[in-house]
Image: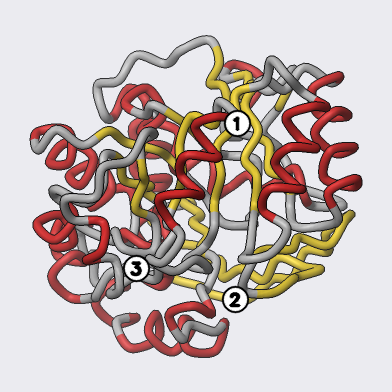
């Protein structure tokens, strides 16, 4: 018989995180612990307000399948019993961690993936004045970051991007509009991004309103984030996007995320690996996907004033794998 615990945690940020949908000053996560024969696996998820999730709703979902978990529910059974989302991710991650500790193999070995020495991660610049965003970009570059993710809303797009590019002329830039743009004017904005050497644009249009991307000729790749959750999302993305952003919280855990990455690649879509504002527990759970990703955005824990131990180690814009081994 397993012992299962679930509980919320709040982790203050050192700096407010601002995107088009609003700002936050803390990371609110839900943790699941599954213990079996003296071995404990831990998983974490971030409830996603964009999809109506709260700590309370996620904890309720977990409680509803508690008897099945206690009786030995497998990851495959979990996929059928729960929809994608934060609750399933927390449980799925805990089950992977439990298996890893029971078999004394890390997630890389369990998935047959060779661990790289490090993974280049995007460092995120949240929305602020053009001058403040340029200053943040320059500071990150000076600390070794080479891939910068620029959060934008529907205002001061040119001013912000021109200031950032002037501050970091050699950095690789990706832009995330978080659904805040409209089809009207999109072509001109894409051209502006291309002229400034931006490598990719993420989710410019609201999910469900992205039909305008079909047959839309654009000079840089466009990545689906809010439009892509699981494999079920993929048919609607073909012909609209060149890339999908896979997050464990959207996919409902590593189990579905691995299948989503494989199917996306089979359809000719590139993969980005993303995360929410989270602790290092959530990054450890996602790392086996990193080698398949064109871009990785794993800086969630770097926004925390204090992180869990063992924390991932980010040095010069890279997650150092050996130094980030789960404890």
Residue 258, above or below 207: above
Residue lying at 37% horizontally and 31% vertically, measured from the top left: 288
Query: Label 3: which residue?
Result: 88
Among the two numbered marks 2 and 1 on one chain, the one whose residue lies closer to the N terminus: 2
Q: Nearer the viewer, residue 126 or 274?
A: 126
Q: Nearer the viewer, residue 64 or 52?
A: 52
Residue 43 location (% of width, % of height): 49, 56
Which-is-in-front pick, marks 1 and 3? Answer: 1
10 Å crowding of disc 2: few (<14), some (14-19), many (20+): some
Residue lying at 52% horizontally and 62% vertically, measured from the top left: 178
User: Mark 2: which secondary structure?
Assistant: strand
Q: Which mark is residue 7?
A: 2
Distance Cα–Cα, label 1 vs label 3 = 32 Å
Among the two numbered marks 3 and 2 on one chain, the one whose residue lies closer to the N terminus: 2
Residue lying at 55% horizontally and 25% vertically, measured from the top left: 197
Among the two numbered marks 1 and 3 on one chain, the one whose residue lies closer to the N terminus: 3
């Amino acid at each position: 018989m397993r012992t299962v615990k679930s509980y919320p945690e709040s982790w203050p940020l050192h700096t407010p995180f601002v995107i088009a949908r609003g700002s936050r000053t803390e990371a609110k996560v839900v943790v699941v612990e599954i213990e079996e024969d003296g071995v404990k696996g831990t998983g974490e998820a971030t409830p996603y307000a964009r999809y109506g999730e709260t700590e309370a709703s996620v904890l309720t979902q977990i409680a509803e399948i508690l008897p099945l978990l206690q009786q030995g529910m497998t990851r495959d059974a979990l996929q059928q019993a729960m929809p994608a989302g934060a609750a399933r991710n927390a449980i799925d991650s805990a089950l992977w961690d439990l298996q890893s500790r029971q078999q004394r193999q890390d997630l890389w070995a369990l998935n047959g993936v060779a661990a790289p020495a490090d993974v280049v991660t995007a460092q995120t610049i949240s929305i602020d004045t053009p001058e403040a965003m340029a200053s943040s970009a320059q500071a990150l570059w000076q600390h070794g970051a080479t891939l910068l993710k620029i959060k934008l809303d529907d205002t001061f797009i040119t001013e912000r991007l021109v200031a950032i590019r002037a501050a970091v002329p050699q950095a690789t830039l990706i832009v995330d509009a978080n659904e805040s743009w409209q089809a009207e004017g999109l072509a001109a904005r894409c051209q502006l991004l291309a002229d400034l050497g931006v490598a990719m644009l993420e989710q410019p249009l609201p999910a469900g309103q992205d039909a305008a991307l079909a047959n839309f000729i654009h000079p840089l790749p466009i990545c689906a984030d809010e439009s892509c959750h699981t494999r079920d999302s993929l048919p609607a993305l073909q012909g609209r996007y060149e890339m999908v952003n896979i997050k464990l919280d959207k996919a409902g855990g590593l189990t579905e995320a691995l299948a989503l990455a494989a199917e996306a690649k089979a359809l000719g879509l590139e993969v980005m690996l993303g995360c929410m504002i989270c602790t290092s527990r959530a990054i450890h759970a996602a790392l086996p996907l990193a080698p398949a990703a064109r871009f990785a955005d794993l800086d969630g824990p770097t926004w925390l004033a204090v992180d869990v131990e063992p924390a991932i180690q980010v040095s010069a814009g890279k997650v150092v794998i050996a130094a980030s081994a789960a404890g």
